[in-house]
Image (cartoon, rainbow, N blue to C red):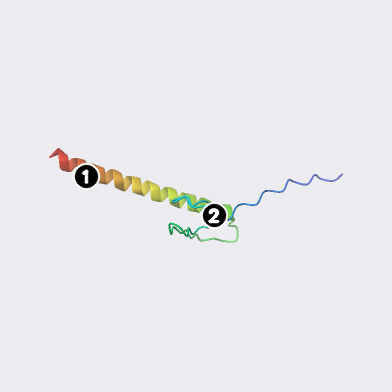
Amino acid sequence: MKRPKPKPRPPLDKTFNCLFCNHEKSTLTCKVCGQTHQSIIHNLSAPVDIYSDWIDACDAVANQTNRNLTQELNLNNNDYSN
């Protein structure tokens, strides 16, 4: 008896919308806003791993920006409270 063939997986996209400016068909370098991402890979790395690293890096930038804005707002509020 033959084993059923597994369904072929759809290929992972190699171009994405830029997470910073939403420009379409960007690789991990956006020609519109200039954002780039590089990642160290090894023999077990797959395109989804690089994409996940990119998402994590974008989240880290957003979190750092939010922390900086919060600190700046706190400093400005302290200036007015005196």
Where does the image place residue 47, in percent across and percent down from the top left? Answer: 58, 55
Residue type marked 2: Lys
Q: Which residue is mark 1?
A: 75
In terms of secondary structure, where does tag 1 sit? helix
Side (left or right) of 21 relative to 11: left
**What crowding class fits label 1: few (fewer than 14 Cα within 10 Å), some (14-19), or many (20 or more)?**
few
Mark 2 and mark 1 lie on one chain; the one further toward the N terminus is 2
Quarter that holds the C terminus: top left
Where does the image place residue 12, in percent across and percent down from the top left? Answer: 62, 52
Residue type marked 1: Leu
Task: Point out the frontmost of discs 2 and 1.
Answer: 2
Where does the image place residue 46, in percent across and percent down from the top left? Answer: 59, 55
**Residue shown at the point (45%, 57%) measured from the top left:** 32
Q: Which residue is mark 2?
A: 25
**Residue shown at the point (39%, 48%) measured from the top left:** 62
Snapshot quadrant of residue 71: top left
Between 2 and 58, which is closer to the camera in this rendering? 58
